[in-house]
Image (cartoon, rainbow, N blue to C red):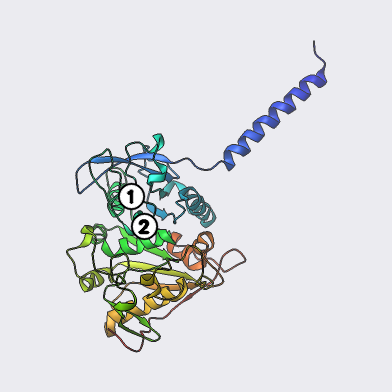
Amino acid sequence: MPPIPFFRALLCIVFFTWTWNAIASTNAPPAWQRITLQNKASQTTYDFPVFANHDLHADLREIQEVIFIQHGIRRNGDTYFSTMLGLLKKSGRAEKNMLIIAPEFPTTSDNGAAFHGMPLWESHGWSAGENAVVRANGTYAISAFEVLDDLLTMVSDKSHFPQIRKITFAGHSAGAQLLQRYAILNHEDEGLRANGTEIQYIIANPSSFLYYTAKRPDKNRFIDYEQAQCPNYDQYRYGMQGMLPYAKNLSGMQLFQRAAARKIIYLAGTKDNNPAHRLLDKSCAAEAQGSNRLERALAYWHYEISLAGQSRSIQHQYFEVNGVAHQQEKMFNAVCAAKALFDVDTDASADAASCQKISPVPFINDQ
């Protein structure tokens, strides 16, 4: 019979191995789920990858709120998902009632067995809501906006989510570009609110904005931009010309009047002001909106207020997040973001930036 010390050593090895595996599994990156969505436009189904804190094929009847968190140009949905899940735990809200979904837009560089049968986009096309260049199951060229529509349809289905009462779309950088345009162009918002579901959009540090008219900021006013400087400055992604089929039947001012009643919250980091940032859109169309993200965000806020006129009939808010640069985790951890995301009041601290709400004062020269 082996001596007692042998068994003690064996037990220690087993315990160490179990502990290490537990730690490794805890620190492992999250795995994405393949879900099947029903496309409203074509009445076809397609698979799509998402990260989520609940099994989306399980019983979800206790879910009351959904947060869609949208990745940036790196398409690191796992990182964005982990950030939002950490903030949920920090908020003290019950995870059983909260569903976090991070859509992961696959591109042609991802083409492989894992994404077989899924729509694939060009590297930047998804961030403007464009159509996939590889069709889902080879049948229908779905747009990135339609994916968001179909995700909305999924979580607003009362047979699976009977307690749903609030849906949030939150995006940073390129993800914020996608959601800023979706907040304006989608056709789902009013129907959800009419059925008692609150919907809001949190737009953090995008490189550019979608303008409703051909005017652009010039110091303390908005003027007709000199097209000779940038012939395509008002083309879609930046303006109303060449609008995507998804929203081509409404004029710019019709879109503004509709969007003004939607709950849109803009967040801009006060240190996201580097005109040479390597991920900043430096096209002439983007430069027409300002030299850096902070300048572009503030100008766009003044632009919307000017469009609203004296009535100030607009449900949008604009916050500057103090001391934060182009950092999604710090933006969403800010005091104003925590309030919008989780309806919790927090104090500014070393890891939670303070916010300044900017009052709606228009530029001197309106449209």
* Residue assigned mark 1: 163
Q: x, y (%) of residue 11? A: 73, 25
Q: Residue furthest front?
A: 228
Q: Position of residue 98 (x, y in %)?
A: 42, 50
Q: Going by the image, does 313 lie left or right of 70?
A: left
User: How far across and down, in percent of the image, does residue 282 sit?
Assistant: 43, 68
Of mark 2 and mark 1, the one earlier in the sequence is 2
Residue 26, horizontal then vertical, whole percent: 58, 40
Out of 37 and 210, give the one closest to the viewer.
Answer: 210
Q: Is residue 276 above or below residue 91?
A: below
Q: Among all residues in the image, which is located at the extreme bottom?
A: 364
Which residue matches tag 2?
A: 127
Nearest-to-viewer mark from 2 and 1: 2
> Residue at left 47%, top 40%?
31
Q: Could you tell me if residue 41 is visible in this image?
A: yes
Q: In the rendered view of the protein, which quadrant contains the C terminus? A: bottom left
